[in-house]
């Protein structure tokens, strides 16, 4: 085996990170790289995945007062509607311009479809995937008649 940094034959190469790139390093070159721990490799992809799932849906409609949310069980709805139409995942993907693997991820609930994909799915499958949801804060004063608006803001600031 050869060291990927200096090219020397090395008896015992170990994986190391050099400028973020994973390389096999000889003992002499280990000092230029950071040792790779398996947990380090796993964490970033998990974090990214969570950000993709949780953050994206919210950003757009924050100022609208009403937000559109995916209905609960949206992934199952997509799957059922597709099967009712007798379409394979591949065929559906072709019609809306998504890869088969993307359709599979969406149906498994692993991937939230983008707004444009949602629109295409609704149109293609004849289903409604988005429902309008009122902002939670709008209902607070109404549900507690004892509080004045001033009280409401005081509790908000705590
Ligand atoms: Zn080396």
Image (spheres, rainbow, N blue to C red):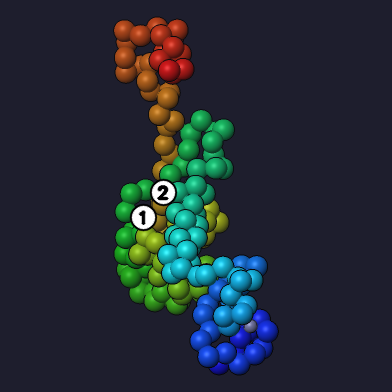
Q: Which quarter of the figure is the N terminus placed in?
A: bottom right
Q: Which mark is residue 70?
A: 2
Q: Which mark is residue 74?
A: 1
Q: Which quarter of the figure is the C terminus placed in?
A: top left
Graded by Cα atoms within 10 Å as few (under 14), some (14 to 19) or many (20 or more), the crowding at tag 1 reads some
Look at the image and tell me whether residue 24 can be seen.
no
Q: Is residue 67 above or below residue 96?
A: above
Look at the image and tell me whether residue 2 can be seen.
yes
Q: Is residue 50 left or right of residue 108?
A: right
Q: Is mark 2 within 8 Å of ligand 1?
A: no
The secondary element bearing badge 2 is classed as: strand
The secondary element bearing badge 1 is classed as: helix
Query: Residue visible at 66% across and 81% down?
Result: 5
Graded by Cα atoms within 10 Å as few (under 14), some (14 to 19) or many (20 or more), the crowding at tag 2 reads some
List x then y, in percent, for residue 109.
Answer: 37, 60
Mark 1 and mark 2: Cα distance apart in space: 6 Å
Q: Is residue 32 above or below residue 155?
A: below
List x then y, in percent, for residue 132.
Answer: 43, 39
Q: Is there CB contact under 8 Å for labels 1 and 2?
A: yes
Q: Is residue 6 left or right of residue 57?
A: right
The residue at the far front in this view is 28
């Amino acid at each position: 085996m050869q060291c990927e940094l200096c090219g020397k034959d090395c008896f015992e190469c170990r994986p190391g990170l050099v400028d973020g790139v994973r390389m096999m390093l000889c003992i002499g070159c280990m000092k230029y790289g950071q040792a790779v721990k398996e947990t380090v490799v796993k964490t970033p992809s998990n974090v990214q995945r969570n950000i993709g799932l949780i953050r994206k849906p919210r950003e757009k409609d924050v100022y609208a007062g009403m937000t559109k949310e995916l209905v609960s069980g949206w992934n199952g709805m997509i799957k059922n509607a597709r099967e009712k139409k007798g379409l394979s995942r591949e065929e559906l993907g072709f019609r809306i311009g998504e890869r088969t693997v993307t359709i599979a991820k969406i149906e498994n609930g692993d991937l939230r479809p983008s707004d444009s994909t949602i629109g295409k799915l609704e149109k293609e499958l004849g289903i409604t995937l988005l429902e309008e949801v009122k902002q939670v804060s709008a209902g607070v004063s109404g549900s507690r008649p004892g509080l004045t608006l001033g009280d409401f803001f005081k509790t908000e600031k705590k």
